[in-house]
Image (cartoon, rainbow, N blue to C red):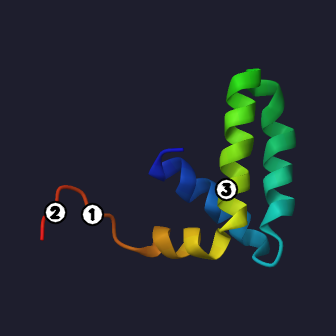
């Protein structure tokens, strides 16, 4: 997912912070008819990755985006 996709999905998953997997399942079910098998498999893996480390993903997205910045 792009950062913008991830931000949108994570905001949806965060509606139920105690169980983001239930919201991820909802996304999978309703997105399925619009995706090819390959897109669906890839999306499911990405959603599973996001939900398995959800607190870290939330923290990462809250950090300011650093584009082209050097130290």
User: At x 81% / y 43%, what residue is drawn?
Assistant: 28
Q: Quadrant of residue 29?
A: top right
Regarding mark 1 in the picture, which secondary structure is present there?
Answer: loop
| For residue 67, side relative to residue 40 (left or right) | left
Query: At which x and y percent is residue 9?
Result: 64, 55
Q: What residue sits right under mark 1 in the picture?
A: 66
Q: Residues within 10 Å of mark 1 (few under 14, many from 20)?
A: few
CA–CA distance between discs 3 and 2? 27 Å
Q: What residue sits right under mark 2 in the picture?
A: 69
CA–CA distance between discs 1 and 2? 6 Å
Q: Nearer the viewer, residue 11 or 20?
A: 20
Asked whether disc 3 touches disc 2, contact meaning CB atoms under 8 Å apart, the reply is no
Q: What residue sits right under mark 3 in the picture?
A: 49
Q: Quadrant of residue 40?
A: top right
Query: At which x and y percent is residue 1?
Result: 54, 44
User: At x 68% / y 28%, what residue is drawn?
Assistant: 39
Q: Residues within 10 Å of mark 2 (few under 14, many from 20)?
A: few
Q: From the image, state whether disc 3 or disc 2 is nearer to you.
A: 3
CA–CA distance between discs 3 and 1? 23 Å
Regarding mark 3 in the picture, which secondary structure is present there?
Answer: helix
Q: From the image, state whether disc 3 or disc 1 is nearer to you.
A: 3
Question: Mark 3 or mark 2: which comes first in sequence?
Answer: 3
User: At x 12% / y 71%, what residue is drawn?
Assistant: 71
| For residue 38, side relative to residue 3 (left or right) | right
Question: Mark 3 or mark 1: which comes first in sequence?
Answer: 3
Query: At which x and y percent is residue 27?
Result: 79, 47
Above or below, 35 relative to 64: above
Asked whether disc 3 touches disc 1, contact meaning CB atoms under 8 Å apart, the reply is no
């Amino acid at each position: 997912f792009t950062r913008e996709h991830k931000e949108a999905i994570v905001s949806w998953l965060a509606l139920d912070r105690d169980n983001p997997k239930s919201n991820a399942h909802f996304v999978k079910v309703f997105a399925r008819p619009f995706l090819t098998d390959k897109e669906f498999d890839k999306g499911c893996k990405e959603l599973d990755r996001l939900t398995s480390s959800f607190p870290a993903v939330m923290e990462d997205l809250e950090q300011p985006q650093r584009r082209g910045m050097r130290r």
